């Protein structure tokens, strides 16, 4: 399906299923200029890189992408991603639900040189400056945002089955030197 909305050209390719979306491509500069806003839902199973980092392929992400301009007039996109996925606890090796709730402000630049100049001018770690394109894939942008929201070493706040772990910690191990001492006394 091809649409033209408010002068912004975008193309959407849908796969099978209610939440399936394989690509959603926009002209980032026109999208920001027209202050467009889109939102949607994407299955975790449809995001190959994110699926590889999760315990299973269940879950869905809700995203909102709004165009606009920053205080200096640079085109920008604001991306919000929320949802839940299951990831593996590195401590007890069981899966647990992890809630993703992330928002990013992306200022658009025409090329790398402009991006570096804008980044230096803004001097704000909470704003990312990226090179905009006329073929920006929103699904990839959503997947990138979700991947950045995952913890590097995921762990439960308190693992559900601590009894086995506590048993191992509390079991007193016999010193190998104690065994040698017993042999010497014989």
Image (spheres, rainbow, N blue to C red):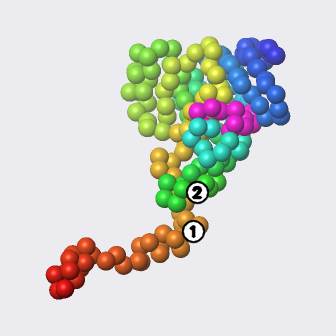
Circle nearer the N terminus (1, 2): 2
- The quarter of the rendered structure image containing the N terminus is top right
The circle drawn on residue 94 is 2
Q: Quadrant of residue 16?
A: top right
Residue at mark 1 to residue at mark 2: CA–CA distance: 9 Å
Residue 50 rendering spot, x and y as whole percentages = 60, 37
Judge whether residue 61 can be spotted in this image.
Answer: no
**Viewed as shown, does residue 163 lie left or right of 9?**
left
Using the image as rendered, state which of residue 162 and residue 149 is in the foreground: 162
Q: Quadrant of residue 67?
A: top right
Residue 108 rendering spot, x and y as whole percentages = 54, 22
The residue where tag 1 is placed is 161
In the orientation shown, which residue stands out farthest toward the bottom? 185
**Viewed as shown, does residue 167 lie left or right of 103?**
left
Q: Residue at image x 34%, y 76%? A: 173
Residue 168 rendering spot, x and y as whole percentages = 44, 72
Q: Residue at image x 68%, y 42%? A: 57
Using the image as rendered, state which of residue 60 and residue 64 is in the foreground: 60
- Say how many tags the image has: 2
Q: Residue at image x 58%, y 37%? A: 52
Give the class, few, some or many, for how many residues have Cα within 10 Å of label 2's Cα (few <14, many ≥20): some
**Viewed as shown, does residue 161 lie left or right of 61?**
left
In this picture, which residue range is highlighted in magenta? 39-50
- The kind of secondary structure element at disc 2 is loop
Query: Is 152 in the magenta?
Result: no
**Viewed as shown, does residue 17 lie left or right of 110?**
right
Q: Quadrant of residue 66?
A: top right
Determine whether label 1 and label 2 are within 8 Å by CB.
Answer: yes
């Amino acid at each position: 399906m091809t649409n033209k909305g408010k002068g912004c050209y975008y193309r959407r390719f849908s796969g099978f299923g209610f939440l399936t979306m394989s690509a959603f491509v926009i002209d980032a500069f026109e999208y920001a200029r027209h202050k467009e806003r889109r939102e949607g839902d994407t299955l975790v199973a449809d995001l190959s890189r994110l699926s590889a980092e999760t315990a299973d392929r269940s879950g869905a992400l809700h995203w909102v992408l709004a165009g606009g301009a920053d205080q200096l007039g640079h085109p920008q996109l604001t991306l919000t991603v929320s949802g839940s996925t299951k990831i593996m606890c590195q401590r007890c090796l069981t899966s647990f639900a992890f809630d993703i709730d992330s928002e990013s402000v992306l200022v658009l630049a025409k090329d790398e040189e402009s991006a570096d100049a804008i980044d230096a001018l803004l001097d704000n770690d909470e704003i990312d400056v990226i090179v905009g394109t006329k073929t920006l894939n929103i699904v990839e942008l959503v997947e990138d945002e979700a991947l950045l929201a995952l913890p590097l070493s995921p762990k439960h706040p308190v693992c559900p089955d601590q009894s086995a772990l506590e048993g191992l910690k509390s079991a007193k191990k016999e010193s190998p030197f104690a065994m040698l001492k017993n042999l010497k006394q014989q």
